[in-house]
Amino acid sequence: MMIRKKKIIVAVTGASGSIYAKLLLDNLQVLSEQIERVAVVMSDNAKEVWRFELGNEDYNNYPFDFYQKMDFNAPFASGSARFDTMIIMPCSMGTIARIAHGISNDLISRAADVVLKERRKLIAVVRDTPFSLIHIDNLKTVTEAGGIICPAVPSFYSLPKTIEDLAQTVVSRVIDLAGLEQQSYRWNEG
């Protein structure tokens, strides 16, 4: 039986947590045999935060298809392109608000709107704390529309030794949610 390779959209917003986006892109490279295509869109703020938090512009070095935040000609701006999954990592609360209210004013919010209307998988890795009631209501709305809210909350039972190990616990959960096979720590599986 031939398994269809996945087409994945990765959106990076200006929320703190560029390490999550970097590790996700690194992992998607390693899992390339399961993936037909990775399309990436970064907000301007995402690039600034990446430079500030990681001290580089390595987002330019990935072998994926990159799109500008206002490029509504990107294939995934339409459901006919059949992208399977959209991962927004990290996802700002402003982005969640626009998605929750159907405001498609840039490629990230348009792509999320398309993924939800086509009943495909949207994974929003929110990175903010604490949540206001407005945030909670928007997260609830996106969840009720079919999105998966996966807070960037690391786990500790794998006994991570570095900040990368800690962040990888979140990235591994996202990769599982996206339906990709990977080697990662599993609770009580030796």
Image (spheres, grey):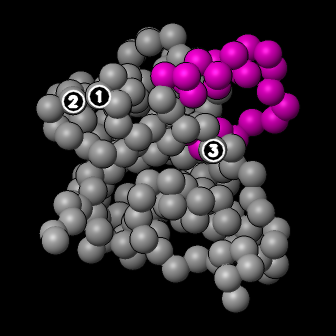
Which residue occupies 21% across, 29% down? 79
The tag earlier along the polypeptide, 2 or 1, is 2
Q: Which residues are magenta?
A: 124-145
Mark 2 vs mark 1: in front: 1
The tag earlier along the polypeptide, 3 or 1, is 1
Q: How many marks?
A: 3
Task: State the residue position of label 3.
Answer: 150
Quadrant where the N terminus lies? bottom left
- Tell me residue 63's x, y (percent): 28, 64
What is the secondary structure assignment of the residue under circle 2? helix
* Residue type at the position of mark 1: Glu
Q: Can residue 25 be spotted in the picture? A: yes
* Residue type at the position of mark 2: Gly
Task: State the residue position of label 1.
Answer: 118
* Residue type at the position of mark 3: Cys
> In 3D space, how far apart are the residues under numbered discs 2 and 1 (Cα atoms)?
6 Å
The tag earlier along the polypeptide, 2 or 3, is 2
Whether pointer 2 and pointer 3 mark residues with C-beta atoms closer than 8 Å, the reply is: no
Q: Nearer the viewer, residue 149 or 65?
A: 149
